[in-house]
Amino acid sequence: MSPERKAMAFSDAQLLQLRAPLTAAGWTTEDVRRFGQAGKKKLTEVKESLKSYLKRLFTDVPVNATDGKETLASSGLFTGGIYGLVLPVPSGNSTLATNSVFDEMAEDGDFATLYGSIPEGDGEWEESQMVDIVRHHKDKLTPNGWATLFRVKGGFVVDVRVRDDGRLRALVYRFSRDYLWHAKYRHRLVSPQL
């Protein structure tokens, strides 16, 4: 590669540093290519990484301190059934009061992609914290029978749904499941607020 060409190429780290300013300025892949700032392949990768998979709906949603012992089954909340995998026995470690955020899907994605796009990180809940959120914030769960997803410690995701009759149903999956969730259903993800 010629010295002039090298001077025009950007490293991955430089592209990451430019991501926010270029997006804020409304630059497209074609704009940057036209100005010779990087190759189309690199910019396509950056543009894909900029995809906004989630839209923030609620912040500062309180989660009470728990004794760490309550489970989906012992809560009595899930009268519509609990399906899928069995979560491990709770740690029994008490948790402190904290806050949560609710995001709604804006783009299709699997668990790793969706949770990886959360600005606060991909924090996990104790099962007892998830139960507390469902108990006190049912009004913030996804309406119309679609999924509200909680990443639970131990490598699981719990999909909570409010049925047409108002009863709650839970489905438990492994976090590694590579199913593509569709944004058109406006599924929600609930994460710890950092």
Image: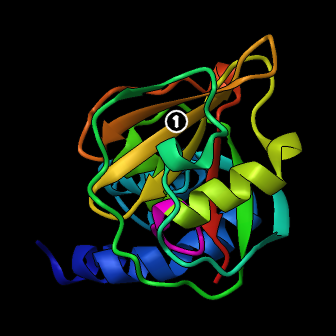
Q: Looking at this rendering, what residue extends furthest in the left direction?
A: 1
Q: Residue at x 80, y 12 (%)?
A: 165
The quadrant holding residue 24 is bottom right
Q: Which residue is mark 1?
A: 159
**Quarter in which the N terminus is drawn:** bottom left
Residues in magenta, as a range = 118-127
Image vertical order of residue 161 relative to residue 14, above or below: above
Q: Residue at x 28, y 34 (%)?
A: 85
Q: Nearer the viewer, residue 118 or 155?
A: 155
Q: How many marks?
A: 1
Find residue 79 and report its horizontal and vertical position in percent: 63, 26
Image vertical order of residue 192 relative to residue 190, above or below: below
Q: Looking at this rendering, what residue extends furthest in the top direction?
A: 164
Find residue 119 and report its horizontal and vertical position in percent: 59, 70
Find residue 145 and report its horizontal and vertical position in percent: 70, 18
The quadrant holding residue 67 is bottom right
**Quarter in which the C terminus is drawn:** bottom right
Residue 123 magenta: yes
Image vertical order of residue 11 relative to residue 126, above or below: below
